[in-house]
Image (spheres, grey):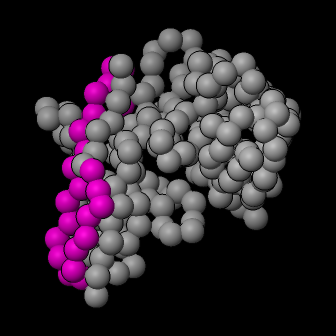
Amino acid sequence: GNSVTQMEGPVTLSEEAFLTINCTYTATGYPSLFWYVQYPGEGLQLLLKATKADDKGSNKGFEATYRKETTSFHLEKGSVQVSDSAVYFCALAVWMNYGGSQGNLIFGKGTKLSVKP
Amino acid sequence: GAGVSQSPSNKVTEKGKDVELRCDPISGHTALYWYRQSLGQGLEFLIYFQGNSAPDKSGLPSDRFSAERTGGSVSTLTIQRTQQEDSAVYLCASSLHDRGKTQYFGPGTRLLVL
């Protein structure tokens, strides 16, 4: 089946520290990979995405590379800020070649990041 | 506004009552998704609409849950005879129907069943 595994939180870092949140996946078909972020009291927002192997998604200083050989999509940021404190979700969407493509997102459990000044 | 909207934002109901949750997708988005976010289960997919059709209802947790979409736009998720385990945040998302297209999420409806 299709699934996403991401590192358990919470993760607590000091401002300007390097961030890595690991994400691995299992998928059949042709997965696209996503990182969504949920800031305190807000809804889910797309942070970045990659739709094919070796693509790199990037946004707001965050990056993730779609690695088919290791089935991974790890999220990284070189220097975190207090404003990055949020819950981060890795997700995949699998598009199958039967009559109706679907593409619903399958989410990891989420990783809570707290950044201290 | 230009985003996905959901109503009500919060709903408190008594066990056994029926509830209706509404989603207004982004104009022009043909694909619409319902998800549920709960402490124990994380984010779960419930149902997907392409236009007014729901090709896959396998994510619905029980036959108390149903959903419809009319005019290729507004969708309603109905939970009959609510149970306490139905308490969760119900999220709606919409996208253009194309591989890899971004799903845009609404703010959710927080449902509490007493």
Relative horizontal placement of residue B46, taking residue A65 as reference (left or right): right
Residue B71 falls within the magenta-colored stretch:
no
Q: From the viewer's perspective, is residue A108 above or below residue B65?
A: below
Relative horizontal placement of residue A102, taking residue B76 as reference (left or right): left
Quadrant in the picture for residue B46: top right
The residue that appears at 72% across and 19% down in the rendered structure is: B63
Q: From the viewer's perspective, is residue B99 above or below residue A65?
A: above
The residue that appears at 52% across and 36% down in the rendered structure is: B44
Residue B41 image offset from top left, x and y in percent: 48, 39
Residue A62 image offset from top left, x and y in percent: 29, 64
The residue that appears at 14% across and 35% down in the rendered structure is: A70
Quadrant in the picture for residue B4: bottom right
Residue A102 image offset from top left, x and y in percent: 54, 25
Q: From the viewer's perspective, is residue A95 above or below residue B9?
A: above
| Residue B26 seen anywhere in this rendered image of the structure | no
Residue B5 image offset from top left, x and y in percent: 74, 55
Give the quarter of the figure containing the N terminus of chain B. bottom right
Magenta span: A8-32
The residue that appears at 20% across and 60% down in the rendered structure is: A20
